[in-house]
Amino acid sequence: MEVNAKQWIFENISGDYHKVRQLAMTQNPEDKPFESLYAARKLLEELNRKLDMASETLCEEDLSVLQGTVFLQVGKNYVDCDEMSSGETYLEKSLVTLSGVENKVNSITCCILVHHQLAVLWASRSEHEKALKQLLDAKMMYEEYNTISYPLGEHELLSGLQDPLSEDERKRLFESLQTHTLYYLAQTYGNLGKPGISAGYCYTTLRRQISSKQYDAIEWSLNCATLSQYYLNTDNYRQARHCLACSEHILADHMSGSDNKSDEMLEKIQQTNSDIARCWIKYCIALLKCSQELTDDGGAQNVLKAREDDFKPFVGVDVSNIESEVPCSPIDTFSAARNLFLFGQKCVESAKHFCTLEWHATDHASIVQDHSQLFKHLIFFEPELERKCRMYKRRADMLEGLIKELNPQHYLILVRQLLFEVGIIYSEMADCKITLTSDSAGPTPHAVLKINKLIGQSSKHFDKFINSFQDHSGRLPDKFDKQCLRSILSAKLWIARLHSKTIAFIPQEQLTSNKKSLENYQWIVTYHKVNQDDVEACFAEELKMCQEMVDMLPLKIARMSQA
């Protein structure tokens, strides 16, 4: 840019532009939220007028870059005032004007910022493909920029280069622009249903932030913990563990200097710490479940090994002490499963410290459910049946305690989930007790009483689940919503099977149990006759078995009655 141009900008532009920047940072009254922005817009319009009259003073290149930069600021102003259509017009106008500038040192920063603004604008309209195009253009501009010196900052030109940034400052801002591009790409690919590509961009964004030391510790920790859940879903346990360990490490470093932080900031730190702990719980559940499901099939082991070979650590973050506490490979012994369970249980207590039932009921309930899942998968590795039964009891107690605390009017869906889960737990506990008695000469009266009580508890919770769909008059609907139909039919099937498990010393009691079992099978078959398509779409395999039982049980009941 020519010297006389810099002088002209200083005399005609920089003063008003300084006021524009001050107005953009002004806090407005609630009843006039855009007051300062409207005042800034008037100043920007005046700057445009001056530039329109400066064609004889400034060369075409200098004029284009100045006008394009002002159009960008006007476009941002309209967007900030929720005037999206006008904002889009000025942003597109800025892009066209800046595209003709040959000296990219002066224009590329604003071009990339325009692409960012347009991407955010299209994303707000759920036009994610159009947002993606803007971001890919911004990424390509960064990659193709090959000038030795770093480009000017966003505000330097309109300030007349009176207080120019250093080369290091320009480098930092330019690299930050690319980091923002990658961050937006991660979000956009996520919105387009491409989680793998999204995760790749998210990882690159986090890595660049760490290496440049430009990040908000709380936001970085939360984003990295969230990324771990993607790797968890792809069975990449080593990468998931590393992300969680880095999240914990970065947040702990931030917390260590928390003496002068506000109460609001301390609460935010505690919440993030709780969120990371909850991600660790999910990690422990997933690894226990994977270990449970994994057989000795070498192919499955090779798949996990290949994913482990994809490991990409964050350079400069030493988390070996945290990672040493938690395995990242499938486990095959009760001792190893117990250690993983205990680590997860420690995270449960940490998460509940912030997510109390009183203030965060839904999150607290989710944590308790996850605690129950930790027990569920530990049970698989427990060799002693008696200890298995005690673990089932722990699961039932914690979930029943939660049901008592939750108001079904406010948390109906959650209460239904809990009732169904507790029903399954009591049924599995009854199976465990039945297996225990099968090893002896026969069940004692006390054992029979215990088994039947557990069966009754299971049936009771499934009944409560079904009855939660009743209307105010106590009637179940003639037709259930498709989303909950499978659960209703499954609950009826569980009850039918439970009655057939009941142990009776008196034939009449066994006859009664078989009749109750038949009633529930018949209910399913009858509902199918009226709602065939719905039932067959979600319950086809189980339906066949129910129809067979409806044919067989009457004969069995008739023989028992005759006897």
Image (tube, grey):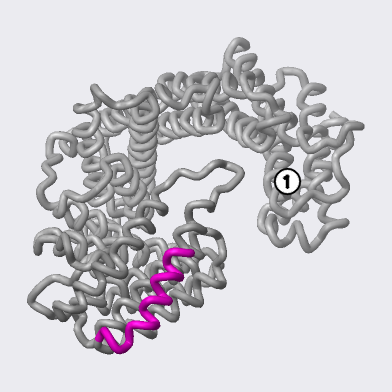
Q: In the rendered image, is residue 6 in sight?
A: yes
Q: Quadrant of the N terminus?
A: bottom left
Q: Is residue 77 left or right of residue 175?
A: right
Q: Is 373 located above or below residue 135 in the figure?
A: above
Q: Which residue is mark 1?
A: 489
The residue located at (89%, 36%) in the rendering is 475
Predominant secondary structure in magenta? helix
Q: Position of residue 33 (x, y in %)?
A: 55, 48
Q: Nearer the viewer, residue 144 or 110?
A: 110
Q: Would residue 383 be visible to someone looking at this image? A: no
Residue 102 falls in which quadrant of the image?
A: bottom left
The amino acid type of the residue labelled 1 equals Leu
The residue lying at 13 percent from left, 34 percent from top is 321
Q: Is residue 554 left or right of residue 158?
A: right
Q: Is residue 246 left or right of residue 515?
A: left
- Magenta stretch: includes residue 206: no
Please tell me how crowded label 1 is: few (under 14), some (14-19), or many (20+) other residues with Cα within 10 Å: many
| Residue 392 in the image, given as x and y percentages of width and height | 49, 24
Asked if the stretch drawn in magenta spans residue 56, the answer is yes
Front residue of this view, candidates 509 and 377: 377
Q: Secondary structure at mark 1?
A: helix
Q: Looking at the rendering, in which quadrant would you find the C terminus?
A: top right
The range drawn in magenta is 42-58
